[in-house]
Image (cartoon, coloured by chain):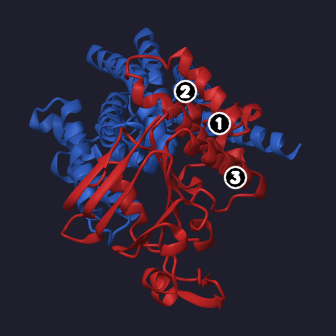
Amino acid sequence: MQRALLATLLLAVAGGLLGTWIVLRRLAFFAHAVGTATFPGLVVAGPWGIAPPLAALGAGLGFAGLLARMTRRGATSADAATGLLLTAALALGAILASDVYRSGAGVDRLLFGTLLGLGDGDVALAGGAAVAALAGTAALGRTWLATGFDPAGAAALGVRATRGDWLLLALLAVTVVAVLPAVGALLVSTLLVVPAATARLLTGSLGGLLSAAVGLAALEGVAGLLLAYHLDLPPGPAIAVLGGGGFALAALASWLRRTR
Amino acid sequence: MTAAIEVTDLSAGYGYGAVALSDVSFSATAGQAVAVLGPNGGGKTTLFRALLGELTATTGSIHVDGRPAYVPQTERSRLDFPVGALGVALMGAYPRTPWYRRIAGRDRALARAALERVGLGDRAGTRFGALSGGQRQRVLIARALVQDAGVLLLDEPFAGVDRTSEEAIMRILDELRAEGRVLLIATHDVEQARRWDRVLCLAGGQVAYGAPAETLTNAVLEGTYGEEIVMLDCGHRAVAIQHHSHSHAH
């Protein structure tokens, strides 16, 4: 339980900070799809004897490469291609799990995570992701802000937009891989998108957004974990439900504030 | 402050050998404002991107004193971004702030002073997206003031701008000229182009360059706009009425 709490807090830092940039740059659907695309990689990791984080990273990068290739000529829009590849990855993973490797009950764990059964390696990975997200925000925050705010004017400000974008995607990959063991391939957005999207409804400043996203991710993560522990629920889905409820409350509060 | 810009036989394009702009030659000295006149797709943006070093010239050469500042059209920016007027003005200090440093206190003072100068000192904390179109344009000009460049490239600075902002922008641009800076002002408005020291007419290539009074003749305007323009002869000078309904290619 202590290990799970520590991992949750570390992932809240990584997911809240990175999630803020992902939501601001409108990469939320992409982040969700990268998470889902890691599923076939996770399925084959065991039978092939590959470390799961590496297998997940490989599958995620394969997804990103295919997406770039499909959208290069502009005939297929990015969101259509993302939806198509996400479905294909999920279907491929399901076939591999049910008919090729007979993964059985392990599939649930891959899809929805197992926050209460994390190993030391998973916690170390979460710590690494938290440090990377903090360092990235400190070093690249201005670049990401200028590029996202005004892509046409960013280069004239001496901002290296392309390098900043690649580093953002690399950090996104690291964070997805770190979040996977806790909440699984299907619920990556629970820690990576939902808290930041909720924070967006509550505050209008960048500093406020970053801290509120981390705070909400920690709050929802810890509350979901406790709820799961005491009521014997799966932790990933419990956090996801709390995240959804938090978003609904924030949306209601924001609507009331506007109509008053 | 002195600044200069010299462009000789410039051609530039967007890869695969497609040339968006060809044979451009002009020069401007300190204190000059140059209107860059042409239809959408005429090469105004391509010229700016080449001057900013984002596009490499396929032929010819560019000389610009220092890194130019760029003032984009406000609707190109993300209005939902969590950044205030002061935050946008502070971006002007990014070029001289290393990634591991915080923005210097001196630059914060400069950004506040720049907002005062464009008449928005009381709006420093207002979110950029909550400002009017004209106010947003003035904030982007404040950002260029903080950047303190010798050469400023302004992309349609008067498009969608209210009267108050237009007057404020005109006043600032005149002050910048008096300080010896070079201004390039992209516009598709012929009457706007007449206000400045020089006019550069672009339609894929250079149609003409010179003082507006001599340059903006019927022949030059027809060469610049082709079918898009209706000419009315009002005695001493040509008046152009443009169709705005088509050609929105960028």
The answer to whether residue B34 is visible is yes
> Chain for mark 2?
A
Residue pointed to by mark 2: A210
The residue lying at 27 percent from left, 52 percent from top is B62
- Residue B134 is labelled as 3
The residue lying at 63 percent from left, 62 percent from top is B159
The residue lying at 52 percent from left, 25 percent from top is A232
**Badge 1: few (under 14), some or many (20 or more) residues near its Cα, within 10 Å?**
many
Q: CA distance from mark 1 to mark 3?
A: 13 Å
Chain A image colour: blue
Compared with A100, A125 (above or below) is above
- Residue A123 is labelled as none
Residue A113 rendering spot, x and y as whole percentages: 38, 32
Q: CA distance from mark 2 to mark 1?
A: 19 Å
Q: Quadrant of residue A41?
A: top left
Residue A27 rendering spot, x and y as whole percentages: 44, 46
Mark 2 or mark 3, which is nearer to you? 3
**Badge 3: few (under 14), some or many (20 or more) residues near its Cα, within 10 Å?**
many
Q: Answer left or right for B137 relative to A124.
A: right
Mark 1 or mark 3, which is nearer to you? 3
- Is disc 1 in contact with disc 3, using a CB cutoff of under 8 Å? no
Residue B166 rendering spot, x and y as whole percentages: 71, 55
Q: B230 or B109: which is nearer to us?
A: B230
Query: Which amino acid, mark 1?
Result: Ala
Compared with A226, A205 (above or below) is below
Q: Answer left or right for A118 relative to A65.
A: right
Give the position of the C terminus of chain B as an image quadrant. Answer: bottom left
- Residue B85 is labelled as 1
Mark 2 or mark 1, which is nearer to you? 1
Q: Quadrant of residue B123?
A: top right
Chain B image colour: red
